[in-house]
Amino acid sequence: AQLVLSRELRRGGRSVARVNGRAVALAVLRDIGDRLVDIHGQTDHLSLMRPREHVTLLDRYAGLMAERERLAGDVRRLSAVRKELASLRRDQRELARRIDLLNFQVDEISAAALEPDEDEALESERRRLSNAEQLTRLTEAAHSFLDQGTDEQAGAADLLSDAAGKLARLVAIDPDAGDILDAAEALTDQISELVRSLETYADGIEFNPERLAEVEERLNLIYNLRRKYGDTIADIIRFGERAVAELERLNNAEVRTGELEVDEARLLAEIGARGAALSTARRAAAQRMAVEVVRELADLRMEQARFDVDFQWREADDGALVEVDEAPGGLSAGRYAFDTSGLDQVEFLVSANPGEPLKPLVKVASGGETSRLMLALKTVLGRADETPTLIFDEIDVGIGGRVGATVGRKLWELAARREQAGSGHQVLCITHLPQLAGYGDSHFAVRKLIVDGRTRTDVVNLRGEARVEELAAMLGSNSTAGRESVEEMLVEVQDFKQTARAS
């Protein structure tokens, strides 16, 4: 599947955001972009600058996501239990009103003793009863035409009988006409059967005003129930069944409440135990992570930088129960707030310079210092960060060529992990440092040109000699010696990449 994000900027100042060609709110585009791209150097776009994500990064680093998901399952089950408890504990007067209404509905439907499709049979019976006189007239008229006839005309049965007699005489003369006589005799039999059927039907016609009143009363009852409980008798019956089930549940509310309270206490204890164990594992992983981050920072000429992970628990009366032997880090037993990630409120702390206290990562200065810090964290977290694209800006501020080469290697390793294992990042870097730029697999130059009095920005993909010339210009020397230095640097970079890919 392909995902295409676009934003059209119009001269009037308005813009249109699109996802796969469909217009969306800018907030939707921003949310998707935050999941796909990290821009390092502009902290408002940086996932590591969102403390709520620190616990997830730590869990991925420590390989704790499976245990965390088990805890999240307990939290979701507890949420369902508490929702049902809240429903059972709602205002007692409202509960009493609901029970009264359900009792009335159940009694009304039960008293009706409805049968499936009963209304259709009653409708048919009402039509017969209300039209009994007309049915009798029509039946008598049909019977007269068939059997008795009128003063001017004999009945069909007599006429057909006369015809059959004449045909019998005809057959006596010409036996080949026997089929005609057979047909006439068959018609005579059919007319006789039709006459008998009409007589039977006429005997069944009922002149019964009392029964008609009963049928209409029953239909009115059914129509009234349909108006309140459903379009069909089957709907009414189902409504009654649901009402009976709800009434039984409400009448047993105290029993159910007790069961749910037991479930709530059990789940709170399980969440407390799982959360405490998860916190212990996180704290151990955080110590290992801090050592690795500090080591990476030293490689990036931040030898005095410090890094730590802060853990906070917040007491809550309705929180998870943690026993004294479960609490990590000298914490006391008690009830603590939790969410689907557990009990910990996790935040990364850093001190970039000697003498500075550890401060939340979100409060460190922006610029190259922050970008190097982010690079160190990204290198350590590795696969823990699933953001596909990383953009580093101003990462070369305050560093020289030697450190620039180190930064270049680390950036390339972040991208190479994607190439080798399929789980790394696409890395884009904006830099003025040739030692760093030399490590890019692709190199683009951004240039401003003035054409016909207007400024235009061009992006040029540099290859071969064009790249050597650009890197030499970045070194500040377009001389032969400068170009040779660039070529030597590119050879060293290629040797490093080949060795890294082979290892």
Image (spheres, helix red, strand yellow):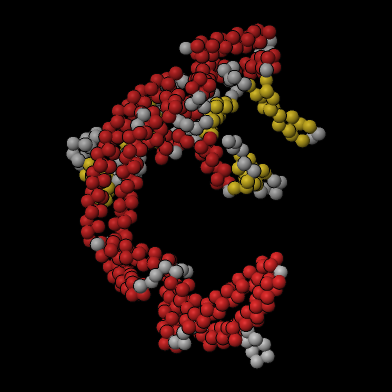
Residue depicted at x 71% and y 46%:
11
384 shown above or below 464: below
Residue that sits furthest to the right in the current view:
452
254 shown above or below 338: below
Which percent across, then down, holds residue 189? 57, 74
Pick the front one: 58 or 248: 248
Which percent across, then down, holds residue 203? 48, 83
Residue depicted at x 62% and y 47%:
23
Pick the front one: 255 or 434: 255
Q: How many marks?
A: 0
The N terminus is located in which quarter?
A: top right
Horizontal placement of 371 versus 354: left or right? right
Evaluate whether residue 8 shows in this view.
yes
Q: Quadrant of residue 183?
A: bottom right
Q: Quadrant of residue 358?
A: top left
311 shown above or below 236: above
Residue that sits furthest to the bottom in the current view:
151
Residue depicted at x 44% and y 18%:
299
Horizontal placement of 9 versus 323: left or right? right
